Amino acid sequence: MTQSRREFLKSCGALIVSFSAGSLRVLSAQSQGQFGTHPSHIDPEKLDSWLAVGADGIITAYTGKCDFGQGIFTAQSQLVAEELCVPIDRVKLIQCDTSVCPDQGTTSGSQSTPTNFNSESLALAAATAREALLGLAAVKLGERVEQLTVADGIITSNMGRYVRYEELIGNKHFNVLLSATAKRRSSRDWTVLGKPIPSLDRTALMTGQFEFVHHVRIPGMLHGRVVRPPEMGATVVHVDEQSVRSVPGLVKVVVRKNFIGVVAETQYQAALAARKLAVQWNPGPELPSHNSFFDHLRKQPSHDVLSVDSRDIEAQLAAASHVIRAIYTYPYQMHGSVGASCAVAEVKPESATVWSATQSVYPTRSIVAKLLNMPVDTVRVIYVRGSGCYGLNGADAVSFDAAILSQAVGRPVRLQFSRQDEMMWENFGSACVVEHRAGMARDGSIVVWDREDWVASLGNRPGYDIPGNVITGMLLGYEAELPEPRSAKAPGGKFRNQSNTVPSYFAGCVAGGCGGGGTIRSERALTHTVRSPFFTGPLRSPLRIQNTFANECFIDELCAHAKADPVAFRLQHLQNSRVIGVLKAAADAASWQARPSPMANFSRAQTVSGRGIACVAYEGDNGYAALVAEVDVDLQTGTVRPKRFIIALDCGPVSNPDGLRNQTEGGILQGMSRALVEEVTWDNRRVTSVDWETYKSLHLDSEMPTVETVFVTPADRPATGAGETAITVTPAAIGNAIFDATSARLRDLPFTPERVKAALLADRGARA
Amino acid sequence: MKKITLNVNGQQHVVAVDPETPLLFVLSDELGLRGPRFGCGMAQCGACTVIMRGQVVRSCVMPVSAVGQDEVTTLEGLGTPEKPHPIQQAFIEEGAAQCGFCLSGVILTAKAVLDTKPDASDQEIRDALGGILCRCFTHTRMLRAIRKYAEAIRA
């Protein structure tokens, strides 16, 4: 990647940047964006903010959506190549550098594809550029635009005359605004987009050449480590600098309120100093017991929101022929990036540069400016990929920490978290409890469904102005976003299902309009957000995976009560055509046998097999998936072994089928790890999941199921997100398959062997 | 500080470091290598893997003074972007990466086990990968790439 990255950053004309991290410094705050755009002030309405054609015919595109392993770098390069009708190797994509790229907020929430691949932002810019070039060519060639065709960066008239892009505009501004009427090339004509182009980073990755943020080196750079508190809420009493006097190469011990860091000449010395530094702390508050945490959660003051409320729940439940109630729990889980987070900062009196793996370069710039007390336009944040993040891992905090240390010593600092710094203090995926009550009619259909959930929350992404949302800010005395206790208002406005709180089977009727995916009209979904003792934040499929686990397992319980086939029963209560589409496609691909769960005849073997299904409309309308899981369960040991997953995915037109398959396989297997083994633990004082012994993840020796992916692509639909859809349905599909195999219902994640055995015992007890 | 001579990827280097410094820090900070990476610092994940004497070594916990005369091979020591090693080629063909941070552990461990035992069974290969973590869960593609390489060397 070295070579290609260097070239990516080599723009045309006014901006010549080479990517040795050292030489980037030269640009610092005086540097210009593409063709003189004010640095840090890049107007997304202007075509020149997104795209430039060099004298060499290279198209340089600037995006605010960055690649952390999900393949969006390649896909965006394909998009630009497609719209500009050039081969992909003529596109140089620059991602997430606040000096030259438009502010596109955060690369998250499965929003990159909907934002940049439909009819706005990067896609619109590329289409606008093609039309602008055609217009210029028409003038130059003296022909009408309709008589021109484009291929390979050359515009040809039907008289046979031609002109190259670079002859029209090479190294010059377009000086036009994005055209709202610019037309995307039809997916039917695509030659680059939609094709399984190998990811552009592949060779560099496999040969060890790829530059991660961990590899950024600046002349004169020092190394830092942080010294975190022993527990949440602990405060500094005394830092004994004498304790590290003997550490060679130590440059400084940095203390700001409860933030402590050390800076040394080498990484080893910094690690040594961090380990040796004696700090006296005031203890934090005692933690609620892990064992009874979900009961604790339900008793706390909460911020309440009703997503939907038909106001006839109790009456309908009272009138129902049968009422079923169940409680599901989902633990805190970690991003647990394999590489501990790292950042490099160079803070000078007049400017600061941070090389960061953040998903949010512009927000990070604002927070760094705030923490350093510098004007925001003197700070530059440059994205360099870190270890896969899956959401808000330590990348933001480590960037803030590095900047603070660099400012304190007046030299560039590279800061590497330890494994424990990363795991104890990241913003975990929220723990949740979901309680369902449903009333069934005599014919086995669902007439009423009430759903109440409790979500633990503290902090979030820091955004542009809330440093306290992550550990660094808290240590510096900033407040975190907190759920403010209040009772629920009646649902108003348009029905929204951003967090998949509402099951797909609800009609979703709010203020006269029904936006849900299903037919159940007696419906209520009430969410209580409760203060969490630990930081929480978006972790791949945030709250969507928790909610979908609870919703899709509970519908399976209702279905079992009705003795119906799980696919047919879902279809009976669905009206969203795209959920129906993926459900049928997954069932077809899996050769699904219509029958009720659990399996009628249990074998006496030690290992039993079952199949389960789950589906979702991700965020209500941002991607659709149905997943069939086939699992084996060892009745003696309680071990669950998924054997085969079959997924049908509808995310509109697919930018890169190979990339999407890779994301989908990864999503399902990550979902399997989260379903089977992952859980953050703590004692009465502190988080005890601090390494890979104490936080379980499926390693590479784990038996892996096969994954089959089927794409469903209805015509003329916009592109949706896809990176989080598959993982969302995985725990539920596995839970339902365990039920099918054993008739035991697992309602608490993860499905550890102990829990499986306990559920088997309870089930036998109930049936005895 | 002590002068230490290291043989890495076919080249000799002399570095002046504290002899207790983990080999990983020397490889990445003194020699500027990008293959081995800091994942956990506790030999639990494999991101820092290098090969010595045909065996995989966790460079995050090995003091540089313990390396001695042994040749150290890192991921970039196997092949180049222009001429990747066959196992790297298999990973390229299978697209067996997402973020790619873990690849030193995956590729070097698979290579070491297959170099020692070219007819290693799938189970033996998997067992060897026991301490390797890929949090993007690219497991199936990685195992496919390893199988492809195994078949090629057996042919």
Image (cartoon, coloured by chain):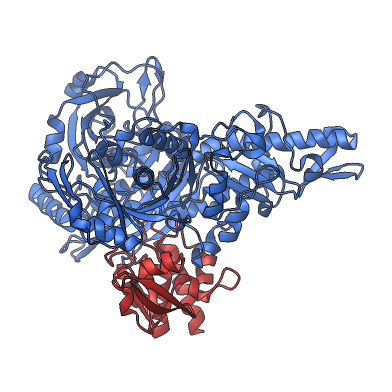
Q: Residue at x 36, y 24 (%)?
A: A508
Image x and y of residue A155, in percent: 81, 43
Q: What residue lies at 74% left-to-right and 34% top-to-bottom?
A: A131
In the image, residue A210 above or below residue A682? below
Quick one: quadrant of the N terminus of chain A?
Answer: bottom right
Nearest the viewer among A36 and A499 is: A36
Q: Is A160 placed above or below B96 here?
A: above
Please determine whether, in this image, residue B63 is positioned above or below residue A487.
Answer: below
- Based on the displayed image, in which of its 4 quarters is residue A12 positioned? top right
Residue A336 placement (x, y as % from top left): 31, 52
How far across and down, in percent of the image, does residue A384 sit?
A: 48, 50
Please state the horizontal and vertical placement of residue A757, each as a whole percent of the image: 14, 56
Q: Can residue A741 be seen by looking at this rendering?
A: no
> Chain A appears what colour?
blue
Q: Is residue A564 left or right of residue A582?
A: left
Is A12 on the left-hand or right-hand side of A622? right
**Residue A375 vs residue A707, the one in the foreground:** A375
Residue closest to the eye, A438 or A425: A425
Q: Colour of chain B?
A: red
